[in-house]
Image: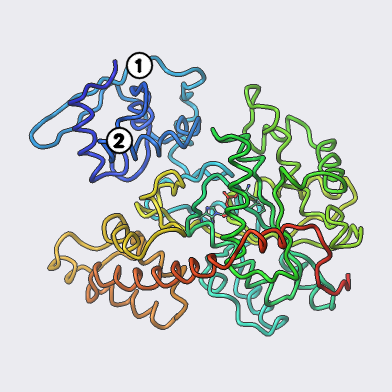
Amino acid sequence: MPITKLEEAVLDEHFIKYSYVKGFTATQSDTALFLQFESAPHKDLPHLLRWYTHIKSFGSERLKFPGCKETFLSFSSNCTKVNIMVDKTLEEGEVVADGQQQEQTEDFVDPWTVRASSNKGIDYDKLIDRFGSSRIDEALLERFEKITGHKPHHFLRRGIFFSHRELNRILNLVEAGKTFFLYTGRGPSSEAMHVGHLIPFIMTKWLQDVFDVPLVVQLTDDEKYLWKDLKLEQCNKLAYENAKDIIAIGFDINKTFIFSDVDFVSGDFYKNVLRVQKHVTFNQVKGIFGFDESSNIGKIMFPAIQAAPSFSSSFPFIFGGKKDIPCLIPCAIDQDPYFRMTRDVAPRIGLQKPALIHSTFFPALQGAGSKMSASDENSSIFLTDTPNQIKKKINKYAFSGGKDTIEEHRALGGDCEVDVSYMYLTFFMEDDTRLEEIRREYSAGNMLTGELKAELIKILQNMISEHQERRKSVTDEVVKQYMTPRPLNFHSKS
Ligand code: TYM
């Protein structure tokens, strides 16, 4: 049954206050409601349109939202109540099997979906167990400091980078005076990157400065073309736009090579892609990535392309054809499935397993339980936001752990565990002492949500406007230099 104009108006009102049908977490009710729409809502209903675009961006992943389907949904606004029947025939392949319902209440993380079952976000301890990685603990950080002579970055000290695979092996090499290289990447699906995307790049820049090592950055315009409803030329263009933001983070031009898969994959790089492809079966990628018979064949082979930069022999112009220079990959933990596969295949093709460090997720404004989406401008802060937009978004959308009234807040205190503004400060406030003071004062009720938000707004406004200034000086010519295959300036001691 198509949605009526009245129902649309009531829904628009609903989505002023709420991110989803049931508050701040996407559920099967969103999926069911989404299916009632035959096309996008009119732009005169901006809140409903935002919700629609956001739910649409999940693609078939919306079938995995938690919760059960209902036969009707009830909404009310301004004394108008509407009941929307959601009994439309399910899309093909859409039935969520009973056995899967149990799983929907658990966290889910893969390269395309990050879903927490609570507003406190993902349970990262459980994820370490499930993925079989290792925790970055105090002992490892002490060793890091001893070997590098650098106090670990606050992302490491605060557990934002919380998990690793064989970081010890990289430290052993450094201790023995040998070298390694860094590899990270970005899937260019939108012009504006959000601040969450910055996290692995900020870490990578710091590691490049500390270790003085080369870096390769892969822009997977091919991946985005295969997964998203975008034209190939558009993805390729976005790769070059995103490269500007990556360069603006400050990577050393003499030690950094950035490439678009569409333009670069060939020669020695492609030979490694083929080696990986020959040693991984369809059954294996089905198990790791959830592909099935209806997945396009580009998706099925793509993981080999994300694997190839882990091997130094893919870049003979940098490493002179050496096969054995080890690689360290900083990324958020959603990318780990690619590298579990890479680590599994590497010894079988006579190459080194890459080491990894994993970050937690920078949460969406609406809460650590909901997903940040590049197609929903209100779900995050973007690198293109103006100071005023930043202020408005934080004040209006950042989920607060404060209490409903000032009296109650003063008496009971705020909850930093769910407060998005506080979480954002843990990422971007460098001063440990001030951060701890804020945590204490807010939890005790001495500091109000508005005051907490004001501190965050100042930090983000400065950070983003400084980034925008640096980006202005990244011309097409500069991008071309970073993206030209060439020798990099480092001393090979492997
Ligand atoms: P993409 O473009 O989805 O994300 C780019 C990088 O940002 C991380 N990330 C986040 N980190 C913290 N909080 C968030 N909310 C958040 N959202 C995304 C991702 O983990 C990633 O590190 N397939 C990749 C591109 C890629 C890549 C790589 C990434 C190719 N090779 C090697 C890392 C390492 C992608 O689409 O990333």
Mark 2: which secondary structure? loop
Mark 1: which secondary structure? loop
Q: Amino acid at mark 1?
A: Lys
Residue occupying the point 38% across, 29% down: 31
Asked where in the image residue 463 lies, by quadrant, the reply is: bottom left
Q: Looking at the picture, does residue 446 appear above or below residue 303?
A: below
Q: Amino acid at mark 2?
A: Lys
Asked where in the image residue 72 lies, by quadrant, the reply is: top left
Residue occupying the point 35% across, 64% down: 421
Distance of label 2 from label 1 (alpha carbons) = 24 Å
Residue 43: give its label. Answer: 2
Is 152 on the left-hand or right-hand side of 489? left
The percent position of residue 131, horizontal first and vertical second, equals 63, 49
The percent position of residue 149, horizontal first and vertical second, equals 68, 85
Pick the quarter of the image with the N terminus. Answer: top left
Q: Earlier in the sequence, mark 2 or mark 1?
A: 2
Of discs 2 and 1, which sits in the foreground? 2
Q: Residue furthest left?
A: 79
Asked where in the image residue 305 lies, by quadrant, the reply is: top right
For label 2, the crowd category at 10 Å Cα-Cα, with few meaning under 14, some 14 to 19 and many 20 or more, is: few
User: Badge 1 is on which residue?
Assistant: 88
Does the beta carbon of the residue at mark 1 sit less than 8 Å from ligand 1?
Answer: no
Residue occupying the point 30% across, 68% down: 453
Q: Looking at the picture, does residue 294 appear above or below residue 298?
A: above
Choose between 188 and 2: the one closer to the eye.
188
